[in-house]
Image (cartoon, helix red, strand yellow):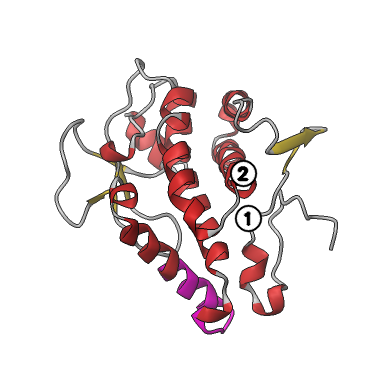
Amino acid sequence: MILDQVVALGPFFAHEQHPLGTAPAAPWRSMSELLDDPAVLEDRVMTTRAYLAAAGGQDPEAVEVRVAASITHLGLIARLVSPALATSVLDAGVPPLDLGSVYWQPVLGGAFPLSLAPPSKSRDLTTEFFEGPVPALNQATQPFSVSDHILRGNVASAINGASVALSNAAPHLAGRAAETAAHLLAHPTLREAHTTTDGTFRRRSCCLIYRAAPDHAGALCGDCALAGDR
């Protein structure tokens, strides 16, 4: 069963399924709330802020809101693209990714529970991703003073991260995963968001996670534009 194969790839790929056009029962919540009610996204950002601060032994006020917003955005995008990339690579089609069709449980600490409608070969991954959650979540996050440059970098990083994780979990799918990711990364909105030199992916921006640590001295992600500069 395709769902079992996807779940076996790891926590960011794992998800449950609900019939298209139906709403799973509580505690599932529609991800469209993030767009329809600004307070829902703000709560997620502030909860992430407190989580990041606690990890560094700080008060929440020590972490900039824009840092928490960027990390929130990156986490949401990564969680959505991962299972969709996997079903596409497995030639099982693509689930609908418009946020009205996606359900979640907004817990913190790793990959939050996610429920998607079944994939279909009539859907195109690029269309579902770049006409669904990407513009919607980018726009919703901008009021938190996160630049478009950073948001596009987050999207590129999430795509590459999903491809790498899939390849590590299923090496026999590595070629197909890289090909699918490369197609997504070639999207016009991402062409200036990353570089790939000698097969090494690097985003052209920073997700800002290092600034959540005391004195803004946290570690950098492996694909960060600032890697090598510190």
Q: Is residue 49 magenta?
A: yes
The vertical placement of 22 against 60, above or below, is above
Identify the secondary structure beneath mark 2. helix
Task: Give neighbour class at mark 2: few <14, some 14-19, many 20+ (Cα, 10 Å).
Answer: many
User: Which residue position is annotated with label 1?
Assistant: 207
Residue at x 75% of width, y 36% of height: 195
Q: Which residues are magenta?
A: 47-60
Q: Any mark on residue 39, and which?
A: none
Please name the amino acid that badge 1 sits on.
Cys
Q: Position of residue 114 (x, y in %)?
A: 33, 47
In the picture as drawn, the residue positioned furthest to the top comes out as: 122
User: Which residue position is annotated with label 2?
Assistant: 157
- Tell which of 138 and 117 is nearer to you: 138
Residue at x 48% of width, y 32% of height: 85
Identify the secondary structure beneath mark 1. loop
Mark 1 in CB contact with mark 2 (< 8 angstroms): yes
Q: Position of residue 45 (x, y in %)?
A: 44, 64
Which tag is nearer the camera, tag 1 or tag 2? 1
